[in-house]
């Protein structure tokens, strides 16, 4: 029995075009054609082809309307728009609505066939990825994210340690979960540990566990997080925050796969069978050069290193993610809020120092204060200021405030603080909160308060 061919739907009012395209594609694909835009929309719903090729100008139904309806009802279908007119506005609008490509007639049929074949291969990869647990939470089709996926699929089935590198908010824990689900340990536990959240005085007992009587208050034996992850994956998030003393003990665990609980008598190490996946938002090699991170541990945990790109480098993914987060809000609150092109353009131009997490928060905040469309004025104040920067004090405060020296001083101080934090975060994308506090010469508690105040932190 032959392999089932993927379906291609052609929607063009020109029967000649339909016939020629069907002949070109029929060796590789099962082709269905219609001259009616309305019929094409219904056929897309029923047949779920991997690709729809839609003419831009049809007498009965506008091609952009067909594109919108297909993407609304069957977003997984790729759509290629076709036209004898290459108007820039139409091309831009088509891509904004989710078109995979825009072809101008007359076609180069050899290139057309090659493009459709590549799209079919890409669709098969995405369908395969959609079967992975947690993969549905990782949104984006940019070239750089496809490269990340290839590395994840290559390294995950092995048992080597993996280091995930990337700025805060780039999805390191989500990818760690995908790595676990693709590994031979997928039926075992996935144990996440936020190394920056555990007080230094407790981190050793939390990781290694302790015996009864190991210290005051240790009334019973307790297993540590290493033992909890046995036969599974231990995810060490923000590993760069571990004290050097703990790094030395972690190196031993990664090398020997054995631990000693605190207070253990004699030498009776506990054997472990686990995989370590670590994550960091700082440059660990640079930290090693400065003496704050062990070089031997860095080499041990980075046998396979995957760098997750910041959102500003994921070209085309910002709009896809924004629509995804908006759809999540609509489902959660049973509403039908949409976003204007102007607001979407602003999102696309913003640099997103807080990455995906910041984008999700901005969409949720805007969603809650509108009744129909998310417009530019609904977006986070920080984004609005970034879109329309101004150094004129009259743009920062009102005329009435200018008559009050105290208010003038407060506004100037707040603006200077916000600009200083933003500048450092942009210049040092891998910086952690402890380092940021030192550069700003404030204590960590004060920094947390200011990050929250200026919209640079997510309390969740």
Image: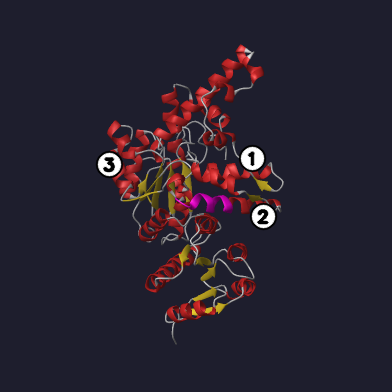
- Mark pair 2, 1: CA separation: 20 Å
Q: Which residue is mark 3?
A: 296
- Residue 319 part of the magenta-drawn span: yes
- Label located before the other in sequence (2 or 3): 3
> Of callouts 2 and 1, which one flags the residue occurring earlier in the amino acid sequence?
2
> Residue drawn 31% across and 49% down?
256
Determine crowd level at label 3: few under 14, some 14-19, many 20+ residues with C-alpha closer than 10 A. few
Magenta segment range? 315-324
Position above or below: 424 against 212: above
Kindly identify the residue that appears in the image at 49 percent across and 56 percent down: 88
Question: Disc 2 versus disc 3: distance between alpha carbons?
Answer: 48 Å
Do residues under tags 2 and 1 come within 8 Å of each other at their CB atoms?
no
Closer to the N terminus: mark 3 or mark 1? 3
Per the rendering, the mark at residue 378 is 1
Q: Position of residue 201 (x, y in %)?
A: 45, 31
Task: Identify the secondary structure beneath mark 3.
Answer: helix
Camera-side residue: 305 or 39?
Answer: 39
Prevailing SS of the magenta stretch: helix
- Horizontally, residue 358 falls left or right of residue 432, namely right
């Amino acid at each position: 029995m032959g392999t089932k061919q993927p379906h291609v739907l052609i929607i063009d009012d020109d029967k000649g075009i339909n016939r020629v395209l069907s002949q070109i594609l029929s060796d590789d694909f099962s082709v269905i054609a219609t001259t009616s835009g309305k019929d094409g929309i219904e056929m897309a719903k029923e047949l779920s082809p991997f690709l729809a090729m839609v003419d831009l100008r049809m007498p009965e139904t506008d091609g952009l309307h067909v594109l919108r309806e297909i993407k609304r009802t069957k977003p997984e279908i790729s759509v290629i728009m076709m036209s004898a007119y290459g108007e820039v506005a139409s091309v831009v609008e088509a891509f904004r609505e989710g078109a995979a490509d825009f072809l101008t007639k007359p076609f180069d049929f050899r290139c057309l066939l090659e493009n459709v074949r590549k799209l079919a291969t890409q669709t098969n990869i995405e369908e395969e990825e959609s079967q992975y647990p947690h993969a549905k939470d990782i949104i984006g089709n940019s070239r750089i994210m496809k490269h990340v996926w290839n590395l994840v699929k290559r390294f995950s089935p092995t048992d080597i340690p993996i280091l995930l590198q990337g700025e805060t908010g780039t999805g390191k824990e989500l990818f760690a979960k995908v790595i676990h689900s693709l590994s031979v340990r997928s039926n075992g536990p996935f144990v996440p540990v936020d190394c920056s959240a555990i007080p230094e005085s407790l981190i050793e007992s939390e990781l290694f566990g302790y015996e009864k009587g190991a210290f005051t208050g240790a009334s019973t034996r307790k297993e540590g997080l290493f033992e909890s992850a046995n036969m599974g994956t231990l995810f060490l998030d923000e590993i760069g925050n571990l004290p050097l003393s703990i790094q030395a003990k972690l190196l031993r665990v990664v090398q020997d796969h054995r631990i000693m609980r605190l207070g253990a008598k004699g030498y009776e190490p506990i054997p472990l069978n686990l995989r370590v996946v670590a994550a960091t938002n700082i440059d660990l090699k640079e930290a090693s050069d400065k003496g704050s991170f062990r070089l031997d541990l860095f080499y041990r945990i980075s046998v396979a290193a995957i760098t997750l790109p910041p959102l500003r480098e994921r070209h085309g993914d910002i709009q896809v993610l924004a629509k995804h987060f908006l759809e999540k809000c609509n489902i959660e609150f049973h509403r039908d809020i949409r976003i204007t092109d102007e607001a979407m353009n602003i999102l696309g131009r913003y640099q997103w120092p807080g990455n995906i997490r910041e984008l999700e928060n901005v969409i949720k905040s805007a969603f809650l204060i509108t009744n129909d469309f998310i417009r530019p004025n609904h977006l986070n104040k920080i984004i609005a200021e970034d879109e329309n920067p101004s150094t004129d004090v009259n743009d920062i405060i009102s005329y009435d405030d200018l008559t009050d020296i105290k208010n003038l001083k407060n506004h100037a101080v707040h603006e200077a603080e916000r600009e200083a934090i933003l500048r450092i975060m942009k210049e040092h994308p891998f910086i952690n909160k402890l380092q940021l506090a030192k550069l700003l010469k404030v204590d960590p508690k004060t920094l947390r308060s200011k990050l929250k105040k200026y919209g640079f932190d997510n309390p969740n």
